[in-house]
Amino acid sequence: MKNKLLKIKETAFQEINKAKDLRVIENIRVKYFGRKDGLLTKVLRGVSDLPKDSRKEIGSVANSIKKELEGELEQAIRVIKGGKVSEAAFFDETLPGKKPPEGHIHPLTRIKLEVEDIFKSMGFEVHEGNELTNLYYNFLSLNFPENHPAMDSYDTFFIKEDPKKKIGLKDRRVMRAHTSNMQVKIMENKKPPLRVIVPGRCFRHEATDASHEHTFHQIEGFVVDEEISIANLVNTQKELLSRIFNKDVKVRLRPGYFPFVEPGFELDASCVICEGKGCSVCKKTGWIELIPCGMIHPKVFESAGYPKGKYTGFAFGMGWSRLAMMKYGIDDIRLFMSGDLRFLEQF
């Protein structure tokens, strides 16, 4: 009986090593382990009929051979499927290697780097800002009155403070609602001429839709020097947009109110997603409200400690999320923060 088992083992190993496809492997499995007629199955069933003194030895040998054959079958299946290769498996070293999967630069990061390069070429400095700030730099230093509705908790995320500590209004901590929170802070430490952009994340408590998010990305920019005019503002923005979209983009200025600029404007760009025909991103108007901007308010210069009337400047803030949407034809801003790999792998 023992010799019969060893012969079965030897024959089975030879057949497994010759197998080239999964169908052959399955036939071998049935041949030796089939419930009715499997060669090894029959031997295992007959162990109970053997004399008591040889039953234990033969049973142990049979079970050991069964485990060895099962392991060899699993290994053969892995080799055929292209998994872990045994030492005996053939490996063709002349075949080209498999290229490992690569990561993808997020479209927001891609557009951020591109915008930074454009502004650097125009002589702008790039500064990082504080996402956690206080009411003074986020609002009050920018000529927002203390009762301005933007400071309401419905728009701004306030940090819960220790009720035992007496904290003045200026020092109340908030998540920045715009990257303009760095404007006065930078002016306090630098003297004109200034050309600065501040890219970063912003946070606002608002309903989300195809063109609005509670967490979004903005670039604040400002220029300060003597005799800066609205013409400088318009030319800077047209240069930026034309280089991002590699074509002449139609723009228009509309009057707009922002406490830290006077006069203030809304610079709109023709929607490049629908070519001005109207879509969900441009709310069927054919125009994207892209760059709030204007001439820096004298009160902001006063907050920075600059001499009265000596300097002029312009400031602007743009959401680079919307720039990315227009450049890459993305029609829903919520996709950026979704973490959906099907979306990210396109870039």
Image (cartoon, rainbow, N blue to C red):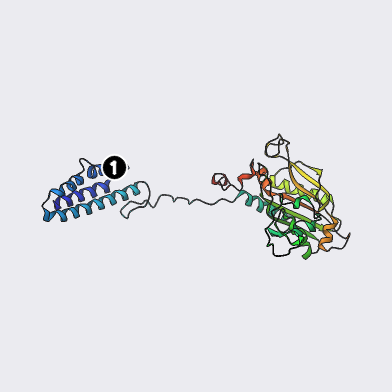
- Residue ID at (12%, 50%): 50
Q: Residues within 10 Å of mark 1 (few under 14, many from 20)?
A: few
User: Is residue 123 visible from the viewing direction of this image?
Assistant: no
- Residue ID at (50%, 50%): 101
**Quadrant of the rendered structure where residue 278 is?**
top right
Instruction: Provide residue 282's location: percent of width, then percent of height.
Output: 71, 39
Instruction: Provide residue 83's location: percent of width, then percent of height.
Output: 38, 50
Where is mark 1, residue-wise?
A: 26
User: Is residue 244 visible from the viewing direction of this image?
Assistant: yes
- The mark tally for this picture is 1
Residue in the foreground of this view, choosing between 175 and 129? 175
Q: Outermost residue toward the front?
A: 164
Residue in the foreground of this view, choosing between 83 and 69? 69
Q: Is residue 41 above or below residue 174?
A: above
Instruction: Provide residue 336's location: percent of width, then percent of height.
Output: 61, 47
Which element type, helix, strand or loop, lies under badge 1? helix
- Residue ID at (75%, 53%): 151
Q: Is residue 343 left or right of residue 100?
A: right
Instruction: Provide residue 266's location: percent of width, then percent of height.
Output: 78, 45
Q: Is residue 200 left or right of residue 65?
A: right
Task: Name the residue type under label 1.
Answer: Glu
Q: Is residue 247 above or below residue 179?
A: above
Q: Is residue 305 left or right of residue 202?
A: right
Q: Outermost residue toward the right?
A: 309
Residue in the foreground of this view, choosing between 213 and 236? 213
